[in-house]
Image (tube, rainbow, N blue to C red):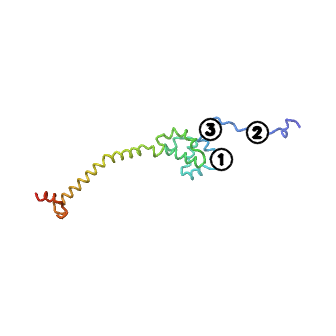
Amino acid sequence: MSLEDPKTMPLKFESPPEPTEPVTALAALRTIRVARGMSLDDVSARLKYPARMIDALESERWDELPKGIGLKTLAKNYTRLLGVDFEALEPVLRQYVPASQGGIANHTSTRAIGESMQEHRSSGSTAWVVLIVLVIAIIVGIAIWQGIVPDSLVPQWLKGASDVS
């Protein structure tokens, strides 16, 4: 037998060709999903997002995806389903999810509500107390003037003022 004989030739193994484009983090999600035996419909059913949206995320078709916090929520739920760390995707999503949408604690309207409540509490509450006392005094004065309050309950110094008129 010669070395050229196919029966004695050692088997040659070829490795798969290297990808010409770098694999992105989002494209890796597709690979992980397929490796776990999950279809787009499986993921869609579990996440309650349309399959076309999951495919758009894996393919980085940004115009077909929700904007801002909706995109971040989709990506976070998808990585949780696959058991992948979300922090690997954050740099990719950062340009599509503005930093100001970091959560309710950073929301400007929430801070504005808290600040305005504190301002009104300090300046507006005194005015309300004065107004309430003034209304009560007017009501009591009218009740005494009209004779609604019995004379035994009216102080002597007020009886003299009501006797003059």
The reply to whether the C-beta atoms of the residues labelled 2 and 3 are less than 8 Å apart is no
Is 18 positioned to the left or the right of 103 in the image?
Answer: right
Q: CA distance from mark 2 to mark 3?
A: 24 Å
Q: Secondary structure at mark 2?
A: loop
User: Pointer 1: what residue?
Assistant: 35
Q: Secondary structure at mark 1?
A: helix
Q: Considering the image in quadrants, where does the N terminus appear?
A: top right
User: Pointer 2: what residue?
Assistant: 13
Measured as percent of width and height from the top left, residue 65 is found at 52, 44
Q: Amino acid at mark 3?
A: Val
Q: Secondary structure at mark 3?
A: loop
Q: Residues within 10 Å of mark 2 (few under 14, many from 20)?
A: few
For this rendering, which residue is in front, 148 or 102? 148
Is 152 positioned to the left or the right of 30 in the image?
Answer: left
Measured as percent of width and height from the top left, residue 120 is found at 33, 46
Q: Amino acid at mark 1?
A: Ala
Q: Which mark sits nearer the N-terminus, 3 or 1?
A: 3
Instruction: Farthest residue to the right: give it.
Output: 1
Q: Residues within 10 Å of mark 3 (few under 14, many from 20)?
A: few
User: Pointer 3: what residue?
Assistant: 23
Q: Considering the image in quadrants, where does the C terminus appear?
A: bottom left
Query: Residue at 31% of width from left, 49% of height from top?
Result: 125
Instruction: Farthest residue to the front: give it.
Output: 156
